[in-house]
Image (cartoon, rainbow, N blue to C red):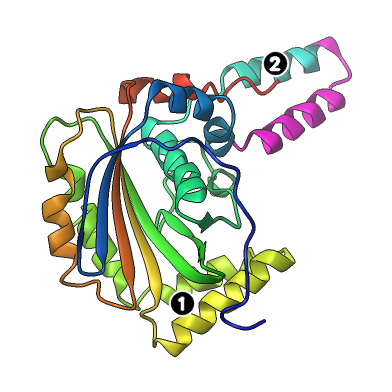
Amino acid sequence: MGEDSAVGGAAPRISQGIEVYGGMDGAVAWSGVELTADVMRELAAGPWAERVGDLDASRDLVTELRSLATTDMETQFISTLLESEPEPLPWQVGEALAEVLLENWHGALWVWDGARERRTRKASLPGADLVGLCVADGSARLLFGEVKSSSQAASPPGVMTGSDGMIEQLKRLAGKDDHLTLMKWLRSRCLTAEHKAAYHTAAGRWVKSRGTDIQLFGCLVRDTVPEPKDLSDRAAVLAKTVVEPMHALLTAWYLPVAMKTWPKHVGVLDVG
């Protein structure tokens, strides 16, 4: 399959939010989007909750465990265990939301559900938050990114700044040190013909560009009033590192519900 051949399929569509600010700085775009109540209801009705809890796999597990219970005591044991399952943490819910919105609005193709990678419910996986493929204009590129959630009033919030902040993490991803590790992870999970073809195209672009033709995403999930300072100055800093053919999008999504209530909003525990 050639580099310019069509790859990827159309993702299920979620209604667009309202862009309240945006701009470009070289190869870095930045955008702030408000999610309306209607969009929130649409998300909570399916794709957001599914991404948080890997609901299909959870339902299959619950059904299997219940089928293995042959006594009342065993059935009660399974029920008690399910009732004790903790909620996901708000940052995990924010990360899942970013994956859903990038898939629906920005051509992201995920070959694996990150919820399946966690060994414990509270675990944070090492490496980049986002590893996938970006499919657009009949081609595909490697996609690496970071997600931060914050209800801090300051603009930009602390998760965007400092050595462990989003911008520094994206600058590290712009380098080549971790690319092979991330590509190895990604390649091993491309199991369908569609995913293998898209990966082959993206890897070809990466080789031809000597590791620079990739798409970076930096996603900030907020429950505060939209503020351009959340991204504008940070975009200028990132633009000093990200240059063509590399591209980056910094996006902030502003939710009308408090961050601490996000796990309850998606209701991912009802799998039985």
Between the residue at mark 2 and the residue at mark 1, the CA separation in whole angstroms equals 43 Å
Identify the residue at image location x=64%, y=57%. Answer: 9
User: Which contiguous range is marked in magenta?
Assistant: 54-72
In the rendered structure, the answer to whether residue 195 lies left or right of residue 243 reads right
Q: Which residue carries the number 2 mark? A: 79
Q: Which residue is mark 1?
A: 180
Name which quarter of the figure residue 17 lies in: top left
Q: Residue furthest right?
A: 70
- The residue positioned 81% from the left and 31% from the top of the image is 64
Q: Is residue 246 left or right of residue 85?
A: left
Q: Which of the two residues, 245 or 221, is positioned nearer the viewer here?
A: 245
The residue lying toward the viewer, choosing from 219 and 30, is: 30
Q: Residue at x 10, y 35 (%)?
A: 154
Nearest to N terminus: mark 2 or mark 1: 2
Q: Position of residue 3 (x, y in %)?
A: 57, 81
Predominant SS of the magenta segment:
helix
The N terminus: image quadrant:
bottom right
Nearer mark to the viewer, of 2 and 1 = 1
User: Hey, what amino acid is under mark 2?
Assistant: Ser
Snapshot quadrant of residue 5: bottom right
Q: State whether residue 209 is above or below residue 117.
A: below
